[in-house]
Image (cartoon, rainbow, N blue to C red):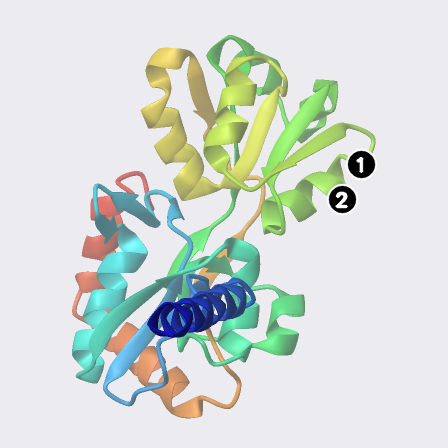
Amino acid sequence: MRNQWCRSRLFVLLFLFAALSLFSGCAPTGQNTAESDLIQPDKNVLRVGVSTNSPPLIFRQADKIVGLEADLARELAAYLGKSLRFVELKWEDQIPALLQNRIDIIMSGMTITTLREVRISFSIPYFESGQMALVRRQDAARYSTGLFTFATSSAIGAIKDTTGAFFVETQFSSIKSKLYTNPNAAVKDLIKKDIDMFIYDGPMILYLASENENKGLTALFTPLTREYLAWGIRKDNVELLDSANKFLRSFNEAGQLNKVIKFWIPLAQ
């Protein structure tokens, strides 16, 4: 009788174990996705959306987020009396995350455009930028006489969903374009001669030219466009927009804005 009871108990335990395994296997996936790391809105926290692949504006150096935007984010948070939390996002996820209230502000080298202004508000600009071209040094003379010489290229690279991609697609529609999600991939293709030039925001092109000088790359220093970088804020967050603008004005009047810009972008006017 005792053996039968033991066998019955063992059967029950095995059944419960199997059931638990089944339910755990059917548990919702994605526990380690961005949603699990969601930072809830907090009046004492400034949640800053960044895409850390755009040196010198915003990038990772070892385990720290650094760059022009990172320094400005720290200054803005201090001005607001809030703690700072960076939220790393893919570039194409920045505006959706802002609209979904997963971040408070985009500080990631975003250009003001008419279409973006349909969905979000922008602070006053903090930097005048523009698209520039990265080329192989041996080809620099070939493009020195004006924009029309770019038409001699067989392929031009740009970053997907940026003003650089828009510039390439509208100005050089007859030339093969290759869109990237990471500038380092474009640089590799440029070195391999898979593309003839890479068009991106001026500060990043200058950084990439410096970083790859020994690999035969250089920048064409004349800007191809005139653009203004600013911070993206939800339209209903008027208080933060006003505070960001007040900060920028006071930081600029104190001479600190130009000092930070010159530190990260020495060639800035």
Look at the image and tell me whether residue 88 can be seen: yes
**Mark 1 burial class by Cα count in 10 Å: few <14, some 14-19, many 20+:** few
Residue type at mark 2: give it: Thr
Label 1: element kind: loop
Of residues 100 and 73, which is closer to you in this image?
100
Q: Are marks 1 and 2 in contact (CB under 8 Å)?
A: yes
Residue 180 lies, in percent from the top left, at 59, 37
> Which mark, residue 196?
none
In the rendered view, tell whether residue 101 sits above or below residue 239: above
Residue 207 lies, in percent from the top left, at 35, 34
Check disc 1 and report the residue beneath it: 173
Q: Residue at x 23, y 72 (%)?
A: 84
Residue type at mark 1: give it: Ser
Q: Residue at x 78, y 28 (%)?
A: 175
In the rendered view, tell whether residue 148 sits above or below residue 13: above
Which image quarter is the N terminus in? bottom left
| Left or right, residue 267 beside residue 153 | left
Q: Residue at x 44, y 90 (%)?
A: 238
Judged from this view, the residue extending furthest toward the top is 138
Residue 231 lies, in percent from the top left, at 42, 68
Check disc 2 and report the residue beneath it: 170
Judged from this view, the residue extending furthest toward the front is 1
Residue 56 lies, in percent from the top left, at 32, 44
Q: How many marks?
A: 2
Look at the image and tell me whether residue 124 can be seen: no
Q: Distance from label 1 to label 2 (Cα)?
A: 6 Å
Of residues 8 and 210, which is closer to you in this image?
8
| Left or right, residue 41 beside residue 77 | right
Quarter of the rendering containing residue 174: top right
